[in-house]
Image: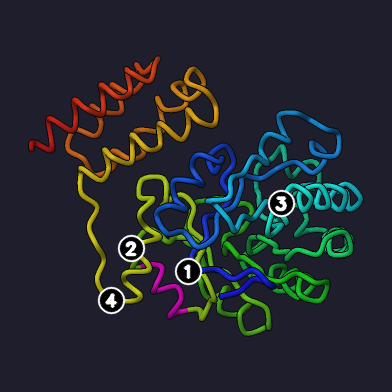
Amino acid sequence: MKIGNVALLYPTILAPLAGITNLAFRRMVKALGCGLVCTEMISAKGLVYQSDQTRQMLASVAEEKPLSVQLFGADPDAMAEAAAMVEAAGADIIDINCGCAVKKVMKNGAGAALMKNPETAQQIIARMRRAVRIPLTIKMRSGWDASGEQAVRLAKIAEHNGCDAVAIHPRTARQRFSGAADWSLIAKIKQELSIPVIGNGDIRSPEDALGMVAETGCDAVMIGRAALGNPWIFAQIHALMETGTCPPVTPDMRFDMMQRFLDLTIDQFGEEIACKMMRGRLGWLARGLRDATGFRTAAAGIYAKTDAESLIRMYREKFCPS
């Protein structure tokens, strides 16, 4: 599929996840077949005000391309200026956050709060469209009630003002991640638009992804939380689409990926910070292993790269005898 002039090898997209989809994580899933990776949400004002911490979130490498950068904010001028900065930094796509339901984001009028204020959302999209040439997308929820009317309205606004694709997570802002995603809303929006529609929500397995496509007609699927414990899900989806079978993930594959994830995170953040991060993150990849709880408990004691490597080696020898 294509988003604007950007061709995706596969119709699978990594969702932007705050604090998670940093460069290291994106490099990991890209190598495992993800069609498009997305940064965690980045503050438009943070970029405009030259925050070093915010600018560091734009760090990228050629191997992860194409790359989508998600911006959040409620000021059309700041969003447009930040978009120009993101384009200059080499991003391939810019995504507009209209779905974050975190209170500190919404209290400033950003994220899902924009679904209550379609006039501001329209101004943001229009200003950003004039500021950049690369494709624009928007990610949103179903709105503030279960009717989905706010989502349909915003999707039409997005298309009319130059967005190249729309991603919909069909839960309300109040639901956050509770309850079930209403896939019928994805189908409804797909019928209303001529630009690509990306479905998100409750894809926990490769079979779920194919089920969403069949049920909604969406052009691509976006996966977030399910990729934490199973970054192979993208390759599994492709295999299921092409061959009808889904390759299993072996314990050896998990231990190999733990080492790879560790190395990538150290490469981005340095050993001290990376090892603090790995205390929780290595446990994501332990999902499905015997004694995964014991592994996660032991990972809390990681202080150096050698600690992490010793833990990986010990559990590999325990569960993957040669």
Q: Is residue 213 magenta?
A: yes
User: In what quadrant of the picture does the N terminus appear?
Assistant: bottom right
Q: Residue furthest right?
A: 77
In this rendering, the label closer to the viewer, 4 or 3:
3
**Between disc 4 and disc 3, whose residue precedes?**
3
**Between disc 2 and disc 4, whose residue precedes?**
2
Label 2, label 1: how many angstroms apart (C-alpha)? 12 Å
| Label 1 Cα neighbours within 10 Å, binned few <14 / some 14-19 / many ≥20 | some
Residue 248 sits above or below residue 217 on the image = above
Label 4, label 3: how many angstroms apart (C-alpha)? 35 Å
Whether the residues at callouts 4 and 1 have beta carbons within 8 Å, the answer is: no
Q: Position of residue 33 (x, y in %)?
A: 42, 59
Magenta region = 208-215
Q: Secondary structure at mark 2?
A: helix
Q: Position of residue 156 (x, y in %)?
A: 75, 75
Whether the residues at callouts 3 and 1 have beta carbons within 8 Å, the answer is: no
Instruction: Give the quadrant of residue 119.
Output: bottom right
Label 3, label 2: how many angstroms apart (C-alpha)? 29 Å
**Between disc 3 and disc 2, whose residue precedes?**
3
Q: Position of residue 136 (x, y in %)?
A: 73, 64
The residue at 53%/51% (across/down) is 63
Q: Which residue is mark 4?
A: 243
Q: Which residue is mark 2?
A: 236
Amino acid type, callout 4: Thr
Q: Which residue is mark 3?
A: 90
Label 2, label 4: how many angstroms apart (C-alpha)? 10 Å
Q: Is residue 58 left or right of residue 217?
A: right
Q: Front-most of 244 and 185?
A: 244
| Label 4 Cα neighbours within 10 Å, binned few <14 / some 14-19 / many ≥20 | few
**Between disc 4 and disc 1, whose residue precedes?**
1
**Magenta: predominant secondary structure element?**
helix
Label 3, label 1: how many angstroms apart (C-alpha)? 21 Å
